[in-house]
Image (cartoon, helix red, strand yellow):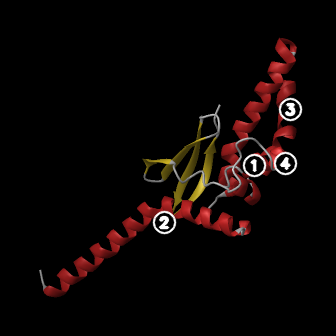
Amino acid sequence: MGRKAKWTLAGTCAVLLALLAFVAAGPYLAMNGIRNVVASGEYGELWRFVDFEQLRDSVRPQVQDRIVRGLMERLGPGGTAQAVGGVTSVIAEPAIDAIVSPTGIALLMHGTALARKVSGGHGAGVDAAPQDPLRNARTRWVSPSLFTATVLNAEGKPVVFEFRRSGISWKLAGLRLPD
């Protein structure tokens, strides 16, 4: 093999290694990007790190299922699932829109901000400074195109953030809420 061919092969290998390293670092870069956008308050820039359509598709069935279960518990055995199912989508859509919006993601990433907002700013055990819920996340590669970051909510139940690869970029595309 000639000198020129060796340099070409070495250059190609270096480019492929750099590309592989960038793809492998992608979920961490996406998490950091979300943190930075939320910290700066520029929620309109979250589209760069969050796929809102996939996130909505991920959250919708979970929210609807919780509403159905809650209504069925209150209605008792006489309530029909079909009647509850029709009402559920009407009730669920505003909740889904609130969760899967730049502001909803920002509140989620601020950790205690939602608790402060609900309690009017004076909840017991609510810190004054916002926290980063992904700081101590347990991360895991599920596949070459799926990466998860699991954090525990206030009740100690896992909330799983799913990052999916599209090409060489990564975005938050799923959220598994605790039961």
State the mark number for residue 168.
2
User: Which x, y percent locates residue 46?
Assistant: 67, 64
Q: Position of residue 165 (x, y in %)?
A: 51, 58
User: Which labelled disc corresponds to residue 114?
Assistant: 1
| Residue 14 can be seen in this image | yes
Q: CA distance from mark 1 to mark 4?
A: 10 Å
Tell me: 4 left or right of 42: left
Q: Secondary structure at mark 4?
A: loop
Question: Mark 2 and mark 4: span between their CA atoms?
Answer: 42 Å
Name the N-terminal-most of marks 2 and 4: 4
At 79% from the left and 31% from the top, the residue drawn is: 67
Q: Amino acid at mark 1?
A: Leu
Identify residue for label 3. Answer: 86
Residue carrying label 4: 120
Q: CA distance from mark 4 to mark 3?
A: 33 Å
Mark 2 or mark 3: which comes first in sequence?
A: 3
Residue type at tag 2: Ile
Real-space Cα separation, disc 1 to disc 3, in angstroms: 29 Å
Which numbered disc, 1 or 3, marks the residue closer to the eye? 1
Question: Quick one: label 2, few (<14), some, or many (20+) residues within 10 Å?
Answer: few
- Which residue, as the protein is rendered here, is positioned at the far left? 1
Are the residues tagged 2 and 4 within 8 Å (C-beta)?
no
- x 87%, y 25%: residue: 83
Residue at coordinates 66% horizontally, 65% vertically from top-left?
39
Q: Nearer the viewer, residue 67 or 145?
A: 67
Per the image, label 1 sits on a secondary structure element best described as helix
* Amino acid carrying mark 3 in the image: Gly
The reply, left or right, for residue 127 in relation to residue 84 is: left
